[in-house]
Amino acid sequence: MISNKCKYAIRALVHIANNEQDDKPVMTSDIAHEQQIPRKFLEIILRELRNNRILESKRGKDGGFRLLRAAEDISLTEVMRIIDGPIAMLPCVSLNYYRKCDECEEESCEIKGVFEQVRDRTLDILNGQTIKSLTLS
Amino acid sequence: MISNKCKYAIRALVHIANNEQDDKPVMTSDIAHEQQIPRKFLEIILRELRNNRILESKRGKDGGFRLLRAAEDISLTEVMRIIDGPIAMLPCVSLNYYRKCDECEEESCEIKGVFEQVRDRTLDILNGQTIKSLTLS
DNA sequence: ATATATCCTATCTGTTTAGTAGTATTTGTT
DNA sequence: AACAAATACTACTAAACAGATAGGATATAT
């Protein structure tokens, strides 16, 4: 399962993409209200996305958030990895968060292969999705 | 990510399948020792698998655990659902643990479709795997 | 100056994860 | 009947994570 936080992050980015206007960034409170996300929790999420160079922010009056890159250059996997960490089902098959299992030797691990397949098919789908493609669907 | 508990459960079942002998069930302590799983934690897991009719147990001297069904009739998904619950990445696309999202309407949800695809491709792989197929690999 | 927005630190409650401890019960053997 | 050896069961714990909330600091447009 992905976390609520991650779901909020995706929905917030899609909302920003849908409301992009060159002059004005999108305010946290607008997103919170329209997407039904607790405002203070959303603040944390948006700041985290900004710290990871997905968003840029502007403070003070008429402040808010804007996509730092084009929506078609922000992949779903990137967002998921920032907010939730690994996508793979086992640490030892994770591409971005690899960690060896404590108790098993990888050469003889019976389940590694299956979860590598799951990872690959999952990434086939998720890598093809961007904030742009989600706004269109 | 699947939990350690779930990984232990799978490895324990594969171990039992590999050590099946008609006369004697497999003891917790043997599995714990050979698979490097904390014994008392493994007890809980094996009892849970027994309560869900994956294993049968025998108490007292020469006791232990046996598969209740043939290894090829125990699917990986069944074990994962017993120990970890849903396999899907969103509650609203789970086949066995469906729950509506609080904040979004499903007809207009932008991300539901993607995660349905992920679920289907994941199940394509995991449904094809059984305790038997894992012993052979 | 002021209103309004993000930024930052701290805190909180409940749940889950990953176990451990100790006792009760069942069963085979002597 | 006694004993040893196995599972069954209840209760507890520590640490991390999920999902937030509170309040003040800072920046900015007017």
Image (tube, coloured by chain):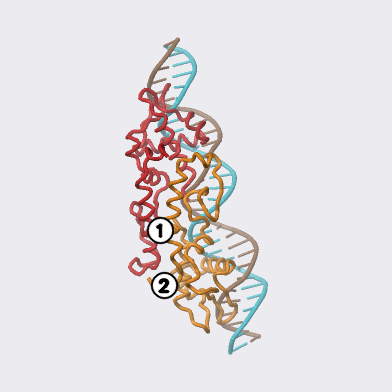
Chain colours: A orange, B red, C brown, D cyan
Residue occupying image coordinates x 35% and y 46%? B128
Q: Where residue D5 appears, x then y in whole percent?
A: 47, 21
- Residue at the disc numbered 1: B90
Residue drawn at the location 57% of the way across and 74% of the way down:
A56
Q: Which mark is residue A132?
A: none
User: Which residue is more in the foreground, A21 or A132?
Assistant: A132
Tell me which chain the residue with mark 2 is part of: A
Q: Is residue A75 left or right of residue B93?
A: right
Which marked residue is nearer to the observer: mark 2 or mark 1?
2
Above or below B105: residue B92 = above
Horizontal and vertical percent for residue B18?
41, 32
Q: Amino acid at mark 1?
A: Leu
Q: Secondary structure at mark 2?
A: helix
- The residue type indicated by label 2 comes to Thr
Residue C1 in the image: above or below residue A119: below
Question: Is residue A67 depicted above or below D30 in this figure?
Answer: above
Question: In the picture, residue B24 is in which quadrant?
Answer: top left
- Check disc 2: other Cα within 10 Å, few if <14, some if 14-19, many if 20+: some
Dot 1: element: loop
Please state, as top left, top right, bottom left or bottom right, where the N terminus of chain A lies in the image.
bottom left
Marks 2 and 1 sit apart, C-alpha to C-alpha, by 19 Å
Q: Is residue B124 left or right of residue A103?
A: left
Please give left or right for residue A67 compared with residue B82 in the image. Answer: right
Name the one closer to the observer, B111 or A71: A71
Residue at x 58% of width, y 66% of height = A52
Contact between labelled residues 1 and 2, with CB atoms less than 8 Å apart: no
Instruction: Where is residue B109? Give x, y as percent.
Output: 37, 67
State the image coordinates of residue A91 (x, y, percent, origin top left).
Answer: 52, 49
- Quadrant for the C terminus of chain A in the image: bottom left
User: Mark number for residue A135?
Assistant: 2
Q: Which is nearer the eye, A4 or B67? A: B67
